[in-house]
Image: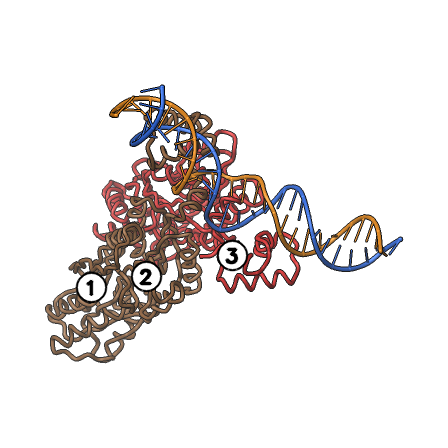
Chain colours: A red, B brown, C blue, D orange
DNA sequence: TATCTCCAAGTAATCGTTTACATTTTCAAT
DNA sequence: ATTGAAAATGTAAACGATTACTTGGAGATA
């Protein structure tokens, strides 16, 4: 590995000129430019990234915090972030937190220590304002964009869909096709999206003059997992006056519910409508294909990273972006009666 | 952000002493140690990583190259790598190549430029020895561990299962329960694992005195996707003397085959045995639950990263590790006749 | 007391860039 | 030919850590 000094010697110029050629940061004659470029090629010179970053005090790295990566939902978002980051000349460091707040905190410290310039977080729970105060003090805005989830701070930027409206709309659809007893499968976690989807569900019921009953609300384990969905659905289906439709806050839970229905002898789609959330790939693998709320996942990732980069480079202020969701009608829902 | 000089002043000692305390790299009296530690705490000092790395010429970063991250198979491996890396004090940089060789090459250049110390690659195709020669020259061993896949080089280390033996064993199982017409769904790609699984399939047939016929071998698109699996299976099932069992080189393909069977009026599990590979989560989501070959995914990731770190730190030579696979019998296979 | 060890601490060079500032060159206008 | 401005180049000081080398002082020995 050779240094800028080697290049300078080879080209017979000073290091400053070489640097100027590399960065286009000052006037250089065509002759010198040519000599330098040739020397660079000849020596196969690559600037030392540490020296540069030490001097420039920048890292060109973005942190990405994601609860897990097994869920295909997050995988798409990460792809979007990656592509945007690459386009902006940033690398990404991925942290799979597995709900481990310590791991998350450790990772975020890389921001402070200058190892990363900013972060896209998908792990924020409702009341985590404090986290930022701890890390960045009360005054300064942390270089963070929240994606999908966000905390209760007033100023922090985020990119998400309007979970409340989406859930409301989904449940309204169920009502519109004749369902009156509509169950809800949520998840015990502190994500704002979960809460908003519950509110949307309740809002739709109330608006239609239907009763909101805790009998119809069941919470799966916090992992959003298939098996948790099954258990939750079984509980719901075992109750008297069982629902004719179930709204689930994730597709994987919905798939679990479908399986549960089948196990207790109900034909999913016909005997029980199930509506999911996320539109993951396996929603279209088996019959009945899942009716679900689709989020623009890749796009959310892209927009988040773009916003973060603009904040870092142009000092753009925090903004809050809602992207469009879409309800995709497939086979798992049918008119009641 | 304060520097080591600030700490030194605060503690009333020299920067050298501070550095010695931080790194334990020389004799320091208990008194100075205490003063320095206190100053560090008081100023909340964090060493500047760029300065350190510039001086020490190390990056403490590992590259991870993965074809895609939507496939839950890879997600687990990445988790394993992450955990091992963290334990060894390394960060990881993830590159989702999407089969884009240029992207991969760009990323690998980070090794040369010192931005990363080593790489775990899951993207290597059979004849890619050349890639390394381009990057590292003919002589020196690149700091790379291959995981799951590997190329035709004799010396490069890898961690994988014995794909040939696993496939052979899987097909032998199908034979043992009475199947004679056994189809194969592969994938048009240049991964060594795909080829070895095909060889295993053929080997099992030959060993049992059954005919190996191209009529029974079908190749899905290179994405391993669900829809490709469906199409491939339909082709296979449409042929005369259709197979009573199909061995698929991935679970997602197998799930597609199951769906295809159902669509042409065959009861999967009873009318057609399907055997998959990988044991992904959705293999257990729907009936018939998938009989499949399970790979120790998380473990493969862990072992790969451990091996890489040992190579980097202790200069350990390259080794080739086979981990144990396991055949998991579930509902998608049944005795023939 | 003088000398010799040895341990602790300090000084300053170094890693490879970038860049403020100084200097030289070029060239048009007088 | 002289001047001046503008353009091109060079010099050297940062950036923040590590570390080879030097120094200072305490205690042991003669």
| Chain name for mark 2 | B
Q: Is residue B35 above or below residue A284?
A: above
Question: Crowding at label 3, few (<14), some or many (≥20) Cα neighbours within 10 Å?
Answer: some
Numbered badge on residue B162: 1
Question: Crowding at label 2, few (<14), some or many (≥20) Cα neighbours within 10 Å?
Answer: some
Where is residue B244 shown, x and y percent of the image? 18, 72
C29 to the left or right of B228:
right
Q: Nearer the viewer, mark 1 or mark 3?
A: 3
Res A26 visible: yes
Query: Marks 1 and 3, Cα distance to the nearest angstrom?
Result: 48 Å
A57 to the left or right of A34:
left
Where is residue A265 shown, x and y percent of the image? 21, 52
Total label count?
3
Q: Residue at label 3? A: A6
Q: Nearer the viewer, mark 2 or mark 1?
A: 2
Q: Depth check: A150 or A112 in front?
A: A112
| Chain name for mark 3 | A
Q: Depth check: B154 or A200 in front?
A: B154
Q: Residue at label 2? A: B141
Whether discs 2 and 3 lie on one chain: the answer is no
Query: Marks 2 and 3, Cα distance to the nearest angstrom?
Result: 26 Å
Query: Marks 2 and 1, Cα distance to the nearest angstrom?
Result: 24 Å
SS for dot 3 = helix
Q: Depth check: B283 or B107 in front?
A: B107
SS for dot 1 = loop
Q: Name which of mark 2 and mark 1 comes first in the sequence.
A: 2
B5 to the left or right of B285:
right
Where is residue B277 shown, x and y percent of the image? 23, 62
């Amino acid at each position: 590995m050779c240094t800028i000094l080697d290049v300078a010697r080879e080209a017979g110029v000073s290091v400053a000129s070489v640097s100027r050629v590399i960065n286009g940061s000052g006037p250089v004659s065509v002759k010198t430019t040519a000599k330098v470029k040739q020397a660079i090629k000849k020596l196969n010179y690559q600037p030392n990234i540490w020296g540069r970053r030490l001097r420039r005090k920048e890292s060109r790295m973005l942190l990405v915090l994601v609860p897990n990566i097994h869920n295909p939902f997050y995988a798409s978002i990460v792809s979007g972030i990656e592509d945007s980051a690459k386009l902006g000349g940033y690398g990404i460091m991925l942290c799979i937190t597995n709900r481990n707040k310590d791991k998350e905190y450790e990772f975020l410290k890389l921001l402070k220590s200058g190892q990363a310039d900013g972060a896209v977080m998908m792990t924020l729970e409702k009341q985590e304002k404090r986290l930022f105060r701890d890390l960045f003090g009360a005054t300064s805005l942390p270089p963070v964009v929240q994606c999908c989830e966000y905390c209760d701070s007033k100023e922090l930027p985020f990119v998400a869909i309007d979970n409340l409206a989406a859930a409301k709309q989904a449940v309204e659809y169920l009502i519109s096709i004749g369902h009156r007893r509509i169950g809800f499968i949520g998840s015990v976690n502190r994500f704002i999206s979960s809460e908003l989807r519950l509110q949307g569900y309740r809002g739709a019921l109330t608006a239609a003059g239907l009763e909101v009953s805790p009998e119809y609300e069941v919470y799966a384990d916090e992992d959003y997992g298939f098996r948790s969905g099954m258990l939750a659905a079984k509980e719901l289906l075992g109750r008297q006056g069982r629902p004719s439709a179930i709204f689930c806050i994730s597709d994987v839970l919905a798939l679990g519910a479908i399986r549960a229905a089948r196990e207790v002898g109900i034909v999913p789609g016909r005997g029980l409508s199930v509506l999911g959330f996320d539109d993951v790939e396996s929603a279209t693998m088996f019959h009945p294909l899942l009716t679900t709320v689709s989020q623009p996942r890749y796009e959310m990732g892209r927009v988040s990273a773009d916003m973060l980069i603009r904040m870092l480079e142009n000092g753009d202020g925090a903004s809050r972006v809602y992207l469009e969701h879409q309800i995709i009608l497939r086979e798992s829902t049918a008119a009641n009666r």
